[in-house]
Image: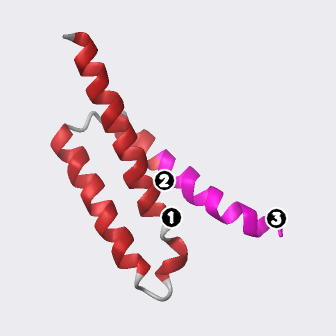
Amino acid sequence: MLQRSLESGWGVLISGAVVAALVFNGLTFGEWRLLMASAMVTTIGMLFHRRLRHFMLLPSCIALASGIALLALSLGMLTER
């Protein structure tokens, strides 16, 4: 029972760690948008695949966390002006 409740938690933790590592690399806005778009397309592709459907949370959380990081970066740039 506990293993079932942790399955989605690992997807969020792994994808959050990936995005946190990418934040420190200093990606441009265009690269962030490309990352978000590719994660969304990957999520759609995984939705229709029989075996990969169970891991669909990984790219969707990467897309969500990338959007949040992009929003934080753009708000930070607005306050500097």
Q: Distance from label 3 to label 2 (Cα)? A: 21 Å
Residue at image mark 3: 2
Which residue is pictured at 40% across the width and 84% down the height? 48
The secondary structure type at the circle numbered 3 is helix
Main secondary-structure element of the magenta-colored stretch: helix
Location of residue 45 by image quarter: bottom left
Amino acid beneath label 1? Leu
- The residue under label 1 is 57
Q: Quadrant of the C terminus?
A: top left
Residue that protrudes farthest toward the right in the picture:
1
Inter-mark Cα distance, 2 to 1? 9 Å
**Which numbered mark, 2 or 1, is in the foreground of this view?**
1
The residue lying at 48 percent from left, 70 percent from top is: 56
Q: Quick one: 62 or 71, which is closer to the camera? A: 71
Tag 1, which secondary structure? Answer: helix
In the rendered view, would you say 76 is above or below 73? above
Image: magenta residue range = 1-17
Counting residues from the N terminus, which is met first, the one under dot 2 or under dot 1?
2
Counting other residues with Cα less than 10 Å from the Cα at mark 3, is it few (<14), some (14-19), or many (20 or more)? few
Q: Which mark is residue 74?
A: none
Q: Amino acid at mark 3?
A: Leu
The residue most toward the top is 81
Q: Where is residue 6 drawn, in percent x and y?
A: 71, 61
Q: Element under label 2?
A: helix
**Residue projecting furthest to the bottom:** 50
Q: Which mark is residue 15?
A: 2
Q: Are marks 2 and 1 in contact (CB under 8 Å)?
A: yes
State whether residue 16 is above or below residue 28. below
Please state the horizontal and vertical placement of residue 49, each as a whole percent of the image: 42, 86
Q: Residues within 10 Å of mark 2 (few under 14, many from 20)?
A: many
